[in-house]
Amino acid sequence: MQLAAASHVGLVRKINQDGYLVRQESSGVYVVCVADGMGGHVAGEVASALALSTLWEALGDQASETDQSARLQAAIQAANEKIHQQANGSEVYTGMGTTIVAAVADSTYIWVAHVGDSRAYLWRNSGDLTQLTEDHSLVNELVRRGQIRPEEALTHPQRHMLTRALGTLPDVVIESRQVSWNRGDILLICSDGLTTHVSDDQVQEFLAGDSALQAKLDVLVQTALEKGGHDNVTVAALFNDDGAQRGNAS
């Protein structure tokens, strides 16, 4: 397995409120996570950092849990509670929150859970790219209801408005799924600073290239900057280079 990540403050903002986590647990399972904070001057940065540190700690506390999906969801719930408590305990942090998309993976399966509009993708070594998450955003809800077209969502004035975030309420509804993957596949996790500027077709093209994993991520971030870089841009990835070849069933 190979891990890589890249993050940039962008060309407009002064503070990078994104954060990422790419680590291997002692059990051999890999953890990949991105959080995109929101709030006041420093609150978003605090929220995303708190989400990642709490998630990692909570996963460690549940190391004996065999249900990886339940384990991941419990860790995200713990992060939600910690952020919500801190937001309510200080005026400086009032209203802070963060997106989160997190995955645990071995060479056979990926378990993904998320809240907000940060995304997870799976690039298959066959060349196909699949979005594993569905944005918890106003525009995605409008698209789902048929009120606007997908292409209209790209420029909608409220495209950054979330319908769900970590830390804004005492409890949060988490979406999760499990997929199988093969040797040569890539799990990509990113903040919306990437997907605002870089299309899925471009992501698919860059991941299919012959360069090293870190170089692929660096190109994705650089492309987002060249196309405007209006937000923080963060990407994290896991390359399956030791799994046995299997079918693509999910």
Image: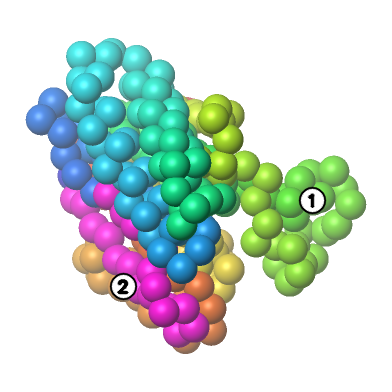
Residue 231 versus residue 73 in the image, above or below: below
The crowd level at tag 2 (other Cα within 10 Å; few <14, some 14-19, many 20+) is some
Residue 249 location (% of width, % of height) = 47, 28
Which dot marks residue 143?
1
Q: On the image, numbered disc 2 is attached to which residue?
A: 218
Foreground residue among 101 and 186? 101
Residue 12 location (% of width, % of height) = 49, 83
The answer to whether 247 appears left or right of 12 in the picture is: left
Residue 32 versus residue 177 in the image, above or below: below
Quarter location, residue 134 = top right
Residue 219 location (% of width, % of height) = 35, 75
What are the residue bounds of the magenta stretch?
2-21
The kind of residue tagged 1 is Val
The crowd level at tag 1 (other Cα within 10 Å; few <14, some 14-19, many 20+) is some
Foreground residue among 190 and 128? 190
Q: Secondary structure at mark 1?
A: helix
Residue 167 location (% of width, % of height) = 50, 40
* Quadrant into which the N terminus falls: top left
Quarter location, residue 139 = bottom right
Circle nearer the N terminus (1, 2):
1
The residue lying at 52 percent from left, 59 percent from top is: 39
Q: Do residues under tags 1 and 2 come within 8 Å of each other at their CB atoms?
A: no
Q: Secondary structure at mark 2?
A: helix
The answer to whether 250 appears left or right of 57 in the picture is: right
Q: CA distance from mark 1 to mark 2?
A: 31 Å
The answer to whether 240 appears left or right of 19 in the picture is: left
Kindly tell me whether residue 130 is visible in this rendering.
Answer: no
